[in-house]
């Protein structure tokens, strides 16, 4: 009885290796994106709670005036925070796209080399 032997190296090089690499890249991206979202949510929650506590400290007209004046700085700070958070997400997305393209190019080259070697 003759035993059939299957060489898995080409299969690994052309399919499984790139699939694992892309899965690892996707998981890394997802982790970074979720971390950014959690950091942002925490910062916004902390800021909102600080604003609420500040409002509870208002006892008179001067306190109210001071609180309202502080709201201008709060709005400015929040606008900057939103801008920074958006830039962070855009940067993560751009990095993921670039890494995905590099991975696809590398996989294509490996597939072409494997196909050429069989010819």
Image (cartoon, helix red, strand yellow):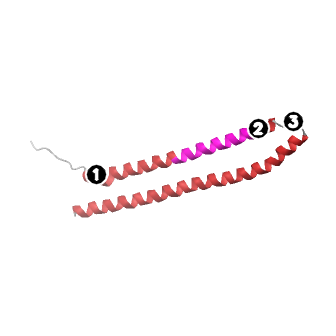
Classify residue 117 as left or right of residue 68.
Answer: left
Q: Earlier in the sequence, mark 1 or mark 2?
A: 1
Residue under the point 76% across and 38% down: 52
Residue under the point 49% across and 57% down: 97
Q: Rounded to the nearest whole Å, what is the CA distance between mark 1 and mark 3? A: 73 Å
Across and down, in percent, residue 15 comes to 33, 52
Nearer mark to the viewer, of 2 and 3: 3
Q: Which residues are magenta?
A: 32-53
- As for residue 45 lying within the magenta part, the answer is yes
Residue designated by label 1? 11
User: Badge 1, how many Cα within 10 Å: few under 14, some, many 20+?
Assistant: few
Classify residue 62 as left or right of residue 112.
Answer: right
Residue under the point 80% across and 38% down: 55
Work out whether 82 lies above or below 55. Answer: below
Secondary structure beneath dot 3 equals: loop
Residue designated by label 3? 59
Work out whether 1 lies above or below 91. Answer: above
User: Badge 3, how many Cα within 10 Å: few under 14, some, many 20+?
Assistant: few
Q: Earlier in the sequence, mark 2 or mark 3?
A: 2
Which quadrant of the rendered structure holds the N terminus? top left
Residue under the point 69% across and 54% down: 80
Dominant secondary structure, magenta? helix
Across and down, in percent, residue 44 comes to 67, 43
Across and down, in percent, residue 4 comes to 16, 46
Work out whether 52 lies above or below 24. Answer: above
Across and down, in percent, residue 76 comes to 74, 53
């Amino acid at each position: 009885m003759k035993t059939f032997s299957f060489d898995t190296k080409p299969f690994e090089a052309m399919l499984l290796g790139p699939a694992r690499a892309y899965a690892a890249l996707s998981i890394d991206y997802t982790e970074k994106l979720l971390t950014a979202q959690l950091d942002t949510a925490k910062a916004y929650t902390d800021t909102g709670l600080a604003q609420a506590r500040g409002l509870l400290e208002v006892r008179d007209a001067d306190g109210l005036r001071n609180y309202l004046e502080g709201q201008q700085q709060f709005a400015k700070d929040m606008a900057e925070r939103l801008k920074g958070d958006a830039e962070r997400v855009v940067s993560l997305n751009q990095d993921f796209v670039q890494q995905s393209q590099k991975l696809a190019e590398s996989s294509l080259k490996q597939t072409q080399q494997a196909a050429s070697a069989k010819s």
